[in-house]
Image (cartoon, grey):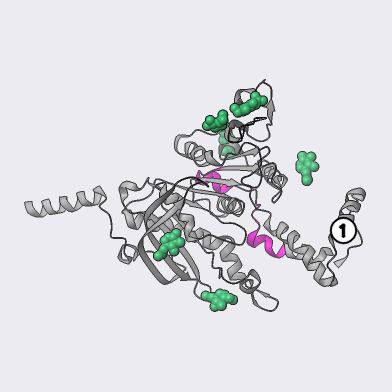
Amino acid sequence: MASLLYLAGGLLSLATLGVAKKCTCGDFSGLTLPNIEVLSLDVAVNRTTVAESPGGHSTSVRFCQVSIQYTHPGQNDAITTWIGLPLREAEWNGRFLMEGGGGWQAGSPRNVLGPVSNGYTSSSTDGGLNTTATAAEWGMVSEGNVNWPAIIDFSSVALDEAARLGKLATELYFGKGLEYSYWSGCSTGGRRGHMMAQRYPENFDGIVAGCPAFNWHRFVMAEVWPPLLAQFLDTRPPSCVLDAFTAAAIEACDELDGVGNVDRFFLQGVDEYTSVIGTDNPDLTGLRKAGGKVLAWHGLADTLIFPNGTIDYYERVVEANKNVSDYYRFFLAPGVGHCSGGSGPNPSAYLLDTVRAWVENGIAPETLPGTGAAVAGTNKTATRTLQLCRYPSVLTYVGADPNDSASFTCV
Ligand SMILES: *[C@@H]1O[C@H](CO)[C@@H](O)[C@H](O)[C@H]1NC(C)=O
Ligand SMILES: *[C@@H]1O[C@H](CO)[C@@H](O)[C@H](O)[C@H]1NC(C)=O
Ligand SMILES: *[C@@H]1O[C@H](CO)[C@@H](O)[C@H](O)[C@H]1NC(C)=O
Ligand SMILES: *[C@@H]1O[C@H](CO)[C@@H](O)[C@H](O)[C@H]1NC(C)=O
Ligand SMILES: *[C@@H]1O[C@H](CO)[C@@H](O)[C@H](O)[C@H]1NC(C)=O
Ligand SMILES: *[C@@H]1O[C@H](CO)[C@@H](O)[C@H](O)[C@H]1NC(C)=O
């Protein structure tokens, strides 16, 4: 009896000490969801080099990599999701963090590397896209027929599932639940962050969403419209003609008129894709109830996704929800480009710490630090760090030294 107890105690302490699992398929045999059929599961220890900032050092990360391929029975789709876990419990910070996405790319195995090398568990998904095929190839099942399951997987469903599979894998591997979960992304990743906040508010305690591409159903239509029209009219105007048109449009700036059919297809496209990939629903009741926090930001010098769309969304969020600042805060970064670039103070390096402090310690951000080039210097590497203002307040210069954050205030 005593020896049995001793044995049981020994096993217990092995478990609580977090002796490494073997990182084999057996650790993840329970990894599935009710609506999916697992097609394959690969588990292996992976050692990969992570390049830090350009010119910086590279570090080697050793982690447990899980690749799961699955289908939604009947939909003829195939989604690959990658999960990364620190090998040992002692290397894990108790948290889950998802990042990434860009353009028509849902994610990649490399998206787990940053989080894992910082102690998080993480996951990423290909969203069901055949990454070696073009959007025209995977996006249509036949001439004129859209591959809706693939588009829905990419837009939302596969992301929700990647979050749930990643969290489940964490629990299976470490034998205990996680303390906090986070989303951090910019551009398509910023749209995703909003998709999570709007449709799957239970998935994340904290969401960082930068320069969000959430009017996707409108701006992708806007982007494909000129080439489509060129094809219809069988003409490709030279740039001098386009310049003349632009000048004339600015000059006239009158209402659209006489364009007839130009409009119908545009509106039809917007309408068809809104429910699928539109991510501009301002109703955040679910997020408020789930207790999640969203830290949103946009660079004012973003020429790819215009900051006004995010301002417009924020105004609608304020209108549709009570006490918005309890769970959604929005910052503008003057002079900062699309997620990076530009000469202004970029908040990227501070976002995750800021949302974590909000979620874990209740410190709601009044301002958000951002770092950019020092002003009027000859030293190209010198920087300044300013405190960005919470919208609608505006960063205003009131002091004498533009390099000094104390010279600015929020008005
Ligand atoms: C190891 O991980 C990296 C990054 O996630 C991935 O690109 C690579 O394919 C993995 N190697 C193997 C053998 O799976
Ligand atoms: C992906 O697309 C390429 C190019 O169209 C095709 O050759 C390949 O079979 C596709 N792969 C899958 C898994 O459908
Ligand atoms: C963006 O919003 C500002 C403030 O409302 C307005 O002055 C500006 O014209 C807008 N820009 C565009 C491109 O719509
Ligand atoms: C908004 O905040 C006030 C003050 O904290 C509180 O009394 C009120 O119940 C909140 N309303 C909602 C809908 O949460
Ligand atoms: C800002 O700081 C840089 C680097 O220290 C310096 O070269 C530059 O003169 C400063 N600008 C002003 C306006 O003081
Ligand atoms: C330029 O600024 C960087 C960062 O502040 C500093 O490390 C470096 O010494 C400066 N170089 C000169 C020549 O002042």
User: Does residue 186 appear anywhere in the picture?
Assistant: yes
Using the image as rendered, state which of residue 56 and residue 297 is in the foreground.
56
Q: Which residues are magenta?
A: 271-294
Ligand 2 quarter of the rendering: bottom right
Residue furthest to the top in view is: 400
Residue placed under numbered mark 1 in the picture: 240
Q: Where does residue 352 sit, x and y in percent of width and height?
A: 50, 42
User: Does residue 323 appear anywhere in the picture?
Assistant: no
Q: Where does residue 163 sit, x and y in percent of width and height?
A: 47, 56
In which image quadrant can residue 398 be found?
Answer: top right
Please identify the quadrant where the N terminus is shown: bottom left
Q: Is residue 224 above or below residue 212?
A: below
**SS at badge 1:** helix
**Ligand 3 contact, mark 1 (Cβ < 8 Å):** no
88 sits left or right of 101 in the view: left
Task: Please name the residue shown 53% across and 40% down the image.
Answer: 349
Using the image as rendered, state which of residue 239 and residue 67 is in the foreground.
239
* Crowd band around label 1 with a 10 angstrom C-alpha radius: few (<14), some (14–19), many (20+): few
In which image quadrant can residue 337 be found?
Answer: top right
Residue 186 is covered by the magenta coloring: no
41 sits left or right of 278 in the view: left
Q: Where does residue 148 sit, x and y in percent of width and height?
A: 62, 70
Residue 276 is covered by the magenta coloring: yes
232 sits left or right of 99 in the view: right
Please identify the quadrant where the C terminus is shown: top right
In which image quadrant can residue 138 be found?
Answer: bottom right
Q: Where does residue 304 sit, x and y in percent of width and height?
A: 70, 51
96 sits left or right of 235 in the view: left
Task: Please name the residue shown 69% across and 79% down the image.
Answer: 143
